[in-house]
Image: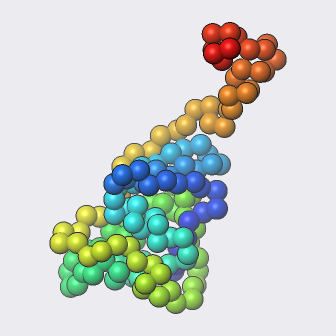
Amino acid sequence: MAYRRADHVAWRALGEETVVVDLRSNWMYGLNETGGRVWEALEESVEPETLAASLGLSGSELERALMAIEDFLAELCSADLVEAIGTSQPTSRESARVGEASVTFVPPAILFSEEIRNFGQSFSEKCFGDSGCDQGSCGG
């Protein structure tokens, strides 16, 4: 089974972390560095085996990475951040590259999730709503 990012999410890499915002539910998620690299690779549909193989690991470390990536993708699916695709066309390892090989594999993880309150409320709604602009709140 292959996976790809859902269309209703926005994201940004911030240093070693990646922040993902679900625009439908107004929840924000922080991903660790490995999770961010996996997230970037999900631009196109990709299979967990391809993601794990692109890490440059072998043997038991490769198996451990595959299990961690599968668990991470399941967690992203349950949060409605990625979509599982029943069958997929083969994806080249280059296009789904997760990152350079590392000495120690750090499993991808969601570091935090938080509801965003008043998400989408614009400055103009705050300042120019029914009651007009409060001099102190708009700076004007």
* Residue at the image position 56 percent from the left and 65 percent from the top: 5
Q: Is residue 8 above or below residue 68?
A: above
Q: Is residue 48 left or right of residue 55?
A: right
Residue 42: horizontal and vertical position, in percent?
Answer: 50, 70
How many marks the image carries: the answer is 0
Determine if residue 3 is in view: yes
Query: Residue 73 lies in what quarter of the image?
Result: bottom left
Write down the quadrant of residue 75 in the picture: bottom left
**Residue 128, image x and y in percent?**
77, 21
Identify the residue at image location x=36%, y=52%.
15
Return the residue found at the far right. Answer: 130
Along the horizontal axis of the image, is 5 left or right of 32?
Answer: right
- Closer-to-camera residue (133/139): 139
Q: Residue extending furthest left?
A: 103
Q: Residue drawn at (63%, 15%), measured in percent from left and top?
A: 139
Which is nearer the eye, 4 or 92?
A: 92
Expressed as whole percent of the image width and height from the top left, the position of residue 76 reads 48, 60
Q: Nearer the viewer, residue 116 or 41?
A: 41
In the picture, the quarter occupied by the C terminus is top right
Side of 12 relative to 124 (left or right)? left
Q: Residue furthest top?
A: 135
Spot occupied by residue 62 in the image (x, y as percentages of width and height): 26, 80
Q: Quadrant of residue 4?
A: bottom right
Where 20 falls versus 107 (above or below)?
Answer: above
Q: Residue at x 46, y 71 (%)?
A: 41
The answer to whether any part of residue 67 appears in the image is no
Name the colouring of the figure: rainbow
